[in-house]
């Protein structure tokens, strides 16, 4: 498997560069989750980072690399989003609650 040194921006991992495994398309994953163990033995805290372009080429505007930016307000919960899935209509995530 190939890996790429990818910088992290913001949050506790700010300024660090980690080797991230690349997928079959040659890109790192869109989200990177880092479980941090609780020192008191509770459930681990999960840090969520989102992939953003590191820069663009001048002429064609192609992405020149990737970096991860800290996302403290992650609402996806690690679930896959399919194009045919219904969007969450309410903050509770249950679209049936939106009907009156």
Image (cartoon, rainbow, N blue to C red):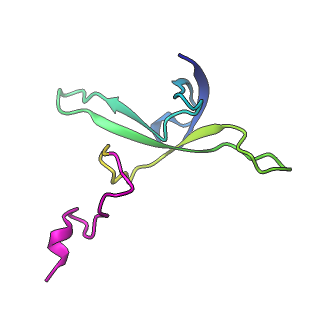
Q: Residue at x 15, y 72 (%)?
A: 97
Residue 55 colored magenta?
no
Q: Position of residue 57 (x, y in %)?
A: 80, 46
- Residue 7 in the image: above or below residue 9: above
Q: Position of residue 54 (x, y in %)?
A: 67, 42
**Quarter placement of the C terminus:** bottom left
Residue 9 image-quadrant placement: top right
Q: Residue at x 74, y 46 (%)?
A: 62
Q: Main secondary structure of the magenta part?
A: loop
- Residue 49 in the image: above or below residue 1: below
| Magenta extent | 80-100
- Towards the viewer: 32 or 47: 32
Q: Residue at x 70, y 44 (%)?
A: 63
Indicate left or right for 6 with 34 as reference: right
Residue 85 colored magenta?
yes
The residue furthest right is: 59
Indicate left or right for 11 with 38 as reference: right
- Towards the viewer: 82 or 68: 82
The residue furthest bottom is: 100
Q: Position of residue 39 (x, y in %)?
A: 24, 26
Q: Residue at x 20, y 64 (%)?
A: 92
Q: Position of residue 35 (x, y in %)?
A: 33, 31
- Residue 22 in the image: above or below residue 70: above
């Amino acid at each position: 498997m190939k890996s790429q040194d990818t910088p992290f921006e913001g949050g506790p991992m700010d300024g660090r560069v980690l080797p991230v495994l690349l997928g079959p398309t040659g890109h790192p994953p869109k989200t990177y989750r880092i479980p941090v163990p609780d020192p008191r033995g509770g459930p681990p805290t999960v840090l969520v980072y989102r992939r953003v372009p590191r820069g663009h080429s001048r002429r064609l505007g192609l992405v020149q690399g990737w970096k991860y930016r800290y996302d403290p307000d992650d609402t996806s919960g690690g679930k896959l989003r399919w194009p045919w899935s219904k969007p969450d209509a309410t903050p509770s995530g249950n679209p049936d609650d939106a009907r009156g």
